[in-house]
Image (spheres, helix red, strand yellow):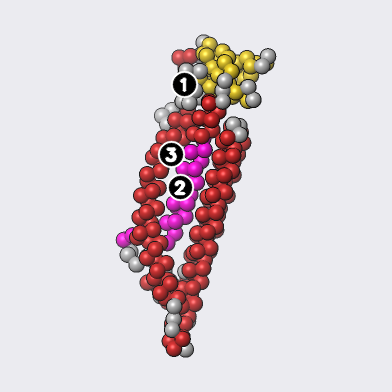
Amino acid sequence: MTSKADRAAAARRVLQRTRTGRWLMSGYLVLSAVVMMAAALYDAAAQLEVAVLVTAALGCALAICVGIANRRARQPLRAHWPELARAPDPRSMQPGAGGCLFVAMLFTLAAFAVVVAVVYGAATASATTEVTVVACNHPHRGQEQICTAHWPADGRTYHGDITWASNDTVGTTVAGRYDPAHPDVVYNASLPYLNGASVMAGTLFVILTPLLIYGYRRYRRECRDPYLAALSRAARVPPAEAR
């Protein structure tokens, strides 16, 4: 398997697998965004948590499967034409880096969905209540402060966790707001958009977004575009040379 025709056939197989994997992962990103945004706008933390976990798990599985399929397709190139099994510049990103960018995009989408859920939920929280903080954990550095509390809403007393209180407020009553359609979720009346979830997700989104933009542009410029161009040139064999 060393003729130019064999080389062209191997290059075409890698091109096909690479393009198929790219379309699969692009479509999955769009689907994940729709699912997570729908869960965020539904204003249900449990549904959003499930949506994030499921889409992240399936997305990682998809990235692994696409990576394995592409790696197997490149095996003949590595064995006989190693120059076609990697990007032209050995110092640049190499084939396979797209899967890492794909997973990072999923986490960025998840962080954005959490921020949207908090902002949308706080914006629709029109009813007021009094929240009694019962107890709070003692988080270590980098962990989230979670407090248990209860509050009256619609003639009932709801118990749940909040991430906008602290140990200083244990045993006190704080003004809160809630959406009449979802009285089991309560927000701080003075700072409804700020809680542990929105701060952590917002920080992650702000950090990952510029890194992703830089990484994706570098990946396209140094790896994907020149690598696909080299494969396309190798896949084109004049009929006279194919014999």
Magenta stretch: helix, strand or loop mostly: helix
Residue at 42% across, 67% down: 228
Q: Quadrant of residue 208?
A: top left
How crowded is the residue under tag 2: few (<14 C-alpha within 10 Å), some, or many (20+)? some
- Marks 1 and 2: CB-CB under 8 Å? no
Give residue 104's mark. Answer: 2
Q: How many marks?
A: 3
Dot 3: element: helix
Which residue is under mark 3? 205
* Residue 177 left/right relative to 4: right
How crowded is the residue under tag 3: few (<14 C-alpha within 10 Å), some, or many (20+)? many
Q: Position of residue 168 (x, y in %)?
A: 45, 14
Of labels 1 and 2, the one closer to you: 1
Vertically, is 166 above or below 106?
above
For badge 1, the amino acid type reads: Leu
Gap between marks 1 and 3, in whole Å?
20 Å
Of labels 2 and 3, the one closer to you: 3
Q: Position of residue 158 (x, y in %)?
A: 64, 19
Vertically, is 104 above or below 198?
below
For badge 3, the amino acid type reads: Phe
Give residue 191's mark. Answer: 1
Magenta span of residues: 91-114
* Nearest to N terminus: mark 1 or mark 2: 2
Gap between marks 2 and 3, in whole Å?
10 Å
